[in-house]
Image (tube, helix red, strand yellow):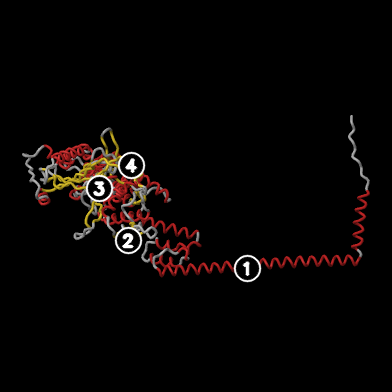
């Protein structure tokens, strides 16, 4: 083990700064968790009431508000989508990266890192998870990426200057764990023995040693180291640091600027010595991600809230008034029987237990002085309505301070339509949306960490497993060297190191839920448009959630027209599809030729009919003319026309009258 006084001083000072800056929030976090766990009475009040045999009721209503937020996160899980950016990024590679991220998340699904941290933020205001790498098996040299939850929300101490909800802007942080004396000696046998008696310990050791529990605090100290460097851009759009580029590429530089190169280092220490040598993390992000609740600044102090932070007082009042009401009712005497002494004198033993035993019959004697009366029970004392009112006010106060009302908690309302019910349920979602939004931001930052880390871990040619949105697995080849058939140059297919990629997160119902909703919508569409059923039935069957749905979808898919058949790599299926397409084209051509022939035939018949009609008209005119010639009508008609024209020509012309001048 090496001593590095300057580094150890930096570690101790930064730890103290981070812990002190967040101390008030940590105290409230502990209070929140105690209340959630059911420790809701002040210790002195609880002991006093229990000592006097007074009721001390705890009806814990806070977990239902936390469950509402946490289960909403489960019902609407965030999903990472990788998008191609600049520098030669490719959409196909972006899709592969998306599938690889899904595969990483699926392998860690049993540990539920996202929901665990989100639920912790709802309970006490903050939660964490981490990204790490490990070998795929004890005998393998290939590594894989994992995401694991940090169960203890107090285990991480952040740089006070970090203000983002994910803490991605932090320059350093600590991840704390505590070891017993035996476990510490077993893990680091060369470390210097630690004394808990306090004689040889300095003042700083109080933050690193716990004498009461005999535990030693061990911290992972993560820090960013910034170095000035020159960033350059090449002709193909790719970028990098100038001193890391091969010299033969310097001629391709088109732009330069000064920047900082960020390195991430991690150091393990117990505050007294460096337990493990400094290791460099291969990305520019600290792989610790925070999920926070509602957070804002009050002056220089950063305030952080959980869902139930302001409901704790009303929960305490609820318990107090419920206990007081119970105590008041318990101390009230039971309604007594009223009668004369002579009526119950002989049966005194029975009447003494009338309020404590269930007698089948109560016997009495008739009093001669009051022959018409009999023993009767008095009306019981009425309970004060003030207690019930205070209990109801405290119950409503918890809903008001959390922003989650009856509809969000599942209580039925007066609404009848589905839209009205969903609108009421959305009130609670809107009131706590910041928690889900911060979870989405944390998952998005995790996606960026993984996209930066994947090319480093998966840096050799290999076949990787990828997952689709529907959970179906597939495999893709990455980093495969090949020769460009057009240029003959050596290239890398699906090169993960080339280009810049962005990350987008979508939050909504799970794929299964959306598939069921899609199936219902498709069936409604088919009912309104039955003629579309033959070309969409494979999609409807695929979205059904019952055994055999996939087989139904495959059979319907084979019944699709050739132009709608999906692409396949099977040569036999491709040949069959081409033959079917050719047959369909030939059939279509035959139908077109038949239609054209029918049109030509109709046009010919129409032209023939028109010629026959014209011929008939000409023949009728000829017959009429011959008839007129034979009867002399034609000569008389000509003479009449000529006489009319001569009369018109010889008629006198009347000049126009001139206007009279005055």
Marks 3 and 2 in Cβ contact (< 8 Å): no
Label 2's element? strand
**Marks 4 and 3: which is nearer the front?**
4
Assess disc 4: are there few (<14), some (14-19) or many (≥20) residues with their C-alpha within 10 Å of its C-alpha.
Answer: some
Q: Which mark is residue 393?
A: none
User: Mark 1 or 4 closer to N-term?
Assistant: 4
Q: Position of residue 497 (x, y in %)?
A: 31, 52
Circle 3 sits on which residue? 287
* Distance in Å between CA atoms under marks 3 and 2: 27 Å
Circle 2 sits on which residue? 475
Q: Position of residue 325 (x, y in %)?
A: 25, 42
Circle 4 sits on which residue? 256
User: Mark 4 or 2 closer to N-term?
Assistant: 4
**Marks 1 and 4: which is nearer the front?**
4
Circle 1 sits on which residue? 598
Q: In the rendered view, tell whether residue 530 sits above or below residue 182.
A: below
User: Mark 2 or 1 closer to N-term?
Assistant: 2
Side of 138 relative to 406 (left or right): left
Q: Position of residue 156 (x, y in %)?
A: 21, 44
User: Mark 4 or 3 closer to N-term?
Assistant: 4
Label 3's element? loop
* Distance in Å between CA atoms under marks 2 and 1: 55 Å
User: Mark 3 or 2 closer to N-term?
Assistant: 3
Asked if residue 336 shows in the view, the reply is no
Marks 4 and 2 in Cβ contact (< 8 Å): no
Label 4's element? strand
Assess disc 3: are there few (<14), some (14-19) or many (≥20) residues with their C-alpha within 10 Å of its C-alpha.
Answer: many
Q: Residue at x 8, y 46 (%)?
A: 192
**Marks 4 and 2: which is nearer the front?**
4
Asked if residue 467 shows in the view, the reply is yes
Q: Give the quarter of the figure containing the C terminus.
A: top right
Side of 542 relative to 334 (left or right): right
């Amino acid at each position: 083990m090496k001593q590095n006084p300057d580094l150890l001083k930096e570690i101790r000072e930064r730890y103290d700064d981070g812990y002190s800056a967040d101390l008030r929030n940590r105290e409230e976090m502990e209070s929140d968790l105690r209340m959630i766990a059911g420790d809701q009475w002040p210790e002195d009040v609880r002991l006093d009431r229990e000592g006097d045999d007074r009721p001390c009721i705890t009806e814990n209503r806070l977990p239902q508000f936390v469950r509402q937020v946490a289960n909403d996160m489960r019902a609407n899980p965030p999903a990472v989508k990788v998008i191609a950016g600049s520098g030669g990024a490719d959409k196909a590679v972006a899709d592969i990266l998306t599938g690889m991220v899904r595969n990483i998340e699926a392998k860690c699904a049993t540990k539920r890192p996202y929901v665990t941290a989100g639920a912790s933020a709802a309970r006490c205001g903050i939660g964490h998870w981490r990204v790490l790498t490990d070998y795929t098996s004890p005998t393998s040299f290939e590594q894989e990426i994992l995401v694991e939850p940090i169960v203890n929300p107090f285990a991480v101490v952040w740089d006070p200057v970090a203000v983002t909800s994910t803490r991605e802007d932090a320059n350093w942080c600590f991840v704390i764990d505590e070891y017993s004396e035996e476990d510490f000696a077993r893990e680091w046998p060369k470390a210097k023995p630690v004394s808990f008696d306090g004689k040889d310990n300095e003042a700083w050791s109080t933050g690193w040693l716990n004498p009461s529990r005999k535990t030693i605090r061990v911290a992972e100290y993560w820090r960013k180291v910034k170095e000035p460097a020159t960033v350059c851009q090449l002709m193909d759009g790719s970028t990098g640091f100038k001193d890391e580029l091969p010299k033969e590429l310097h001629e391709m530089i088109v732009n330069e600027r000064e920047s900082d190169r960020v390195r991430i280092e991690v150091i393990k220490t117990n505050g007294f010595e460096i337990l493990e040598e400094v290791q460099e993390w291969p990305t520019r992000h600290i792989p610790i991600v925070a999920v926070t609740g509602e957070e804002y600044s009050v002056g220089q102090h950063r305030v952080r809230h959980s869902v139930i932070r302001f409901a704790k007082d009303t929960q305490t009042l609820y318990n107090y008034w419920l206990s007081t009401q119970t105590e008041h009712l318990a101390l009230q005497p039971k309604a007594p029987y009223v009668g004369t002494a002579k009526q119950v004198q002989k049966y005194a033993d029975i009447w003494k237990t009338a309020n404590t035993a269930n007698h089948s019959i109560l016997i009495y004697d008739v009093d001669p002085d009051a022959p018409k009366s009999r023993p009767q029970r008095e009306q019981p004392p009425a309970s004060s309505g003030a207690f019930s009112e205070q209990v109801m006010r405290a119950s409503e106060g918890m809903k008001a301070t959390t922003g989650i009302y009856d509809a969000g908690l599942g209580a039925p309302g007066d609404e009848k339509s589905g839209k009205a019910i969903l609108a009421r349920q959305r009130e609670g979602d809107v009131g706590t949306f910041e928690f889900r939004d911060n979870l989405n931001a944390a998952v998005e930052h995790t996606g960026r960490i993984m996209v930066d880390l994947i090319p480093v871990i998966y840096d050799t040619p290999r076949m990787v497993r990828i997952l689709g949105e529907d959970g179906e697995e597939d495999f893709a080849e990455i980093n495969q060297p090949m020769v460009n058939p057009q240029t003959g140059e050596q290239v890398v297919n699906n090169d993960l190191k080339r280009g810049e990629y962005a990350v987008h997160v979508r939050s909504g119902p799970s794929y299964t839920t959306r598939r069921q909703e899609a199936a219902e919508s498709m069936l409604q569409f088919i009912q309104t448009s039955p003629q579309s059923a033959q070309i969409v039935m494979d999609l409807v069957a695929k979205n059904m959630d019952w055994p055999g749905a996939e087989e139904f979808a495959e059979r319907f898919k084979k019944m699709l027209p050739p132009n709608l058949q999906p692409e396949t790599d099977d040569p036999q299926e491709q040949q069959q599809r081409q033959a079917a397409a050719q047959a369909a084209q030939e059939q279509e051509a035959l139908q077109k030729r038949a239609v054209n022939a029918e049109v030509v035939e109709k046009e010919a018949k129409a032209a023939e009919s028109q010629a026959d009609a014209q011929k008939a008209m000409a023949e009728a005119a000829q017959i009429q003319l011959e008839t007129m010639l034979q009867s002399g009508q034609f000569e008389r008609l000509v003479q009449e026309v000529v006489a009319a024209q001569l009369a018109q020509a010889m008629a006198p012309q009347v000049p126009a009258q001139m206007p009279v001048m005055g």
